[in-house]
Amino acid sequence: MNKFALALIKTGIAVLVLFAATFSVYFFNLDMKLVYKVQKLLGKHYDNQEKDRKL
């Protein structure tokens, strides 16, 4: 096998792996689950800050 065919096969495998990963994130709604957890942590942080009501 020449170098071009080997590179083409490796690129194809990489594309399939990336597609499987992004499809899994989409199918199981993992992006919004992560956003929910981050939002809870940020809410705790910003709720504990001192508020300045002067506009």
Image (tube, rainbow, N blue to C red):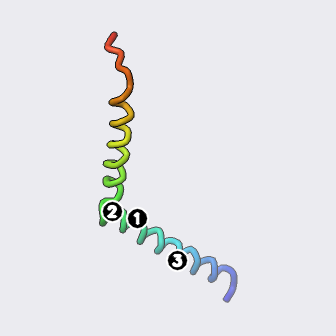
Residue 55 placement: quadrant: top left
Q: Confirm or deny contact between disc 1 and disc 2 (CB under 8 A).
A: yes
Looking at the rendering, in which quadrant would you find the N terminus? bottom right
User: Element type at marker 1?
Assistant: helix
Q: CA distance from mark 1 to mark 2?
A: 6 Å
Residue 48 placement: quadrant: top left
Classify mark 2: residues with Cα within 10 Å, few (<14), some (14-19) or many (20+): few
- Indicate the amino acid at tag 1: Thr
Q: Nearer the viewer, residue 12 or 23?
A: 23
Q: Which mark identifies residue 26?
A: 2
- Mark 3, residue position: 13
Instruction: Give percent across and percent down for residue 2.
Output: 69, 85
- Sequence-earlier tag: 3 or 1: 3
Instruction: Give percent across and percent down for residue 32.
Output: 31, 53
Q: Nearer the viewer, residue 12 or 22?
A: 22
Q: Is residue 35 above or below residue 8?
A: above
Left or right of residue 9, residue 42 in this image: left
- Mark 1, residue position: 22
Left or right of residue 40, residue 19 in this image: right
- Indicate the amino acid at tag 2: Tyr
- Sequence-earlier tag: 3 or 2: 3
- Indicate the amino acid at tag 3: Ile
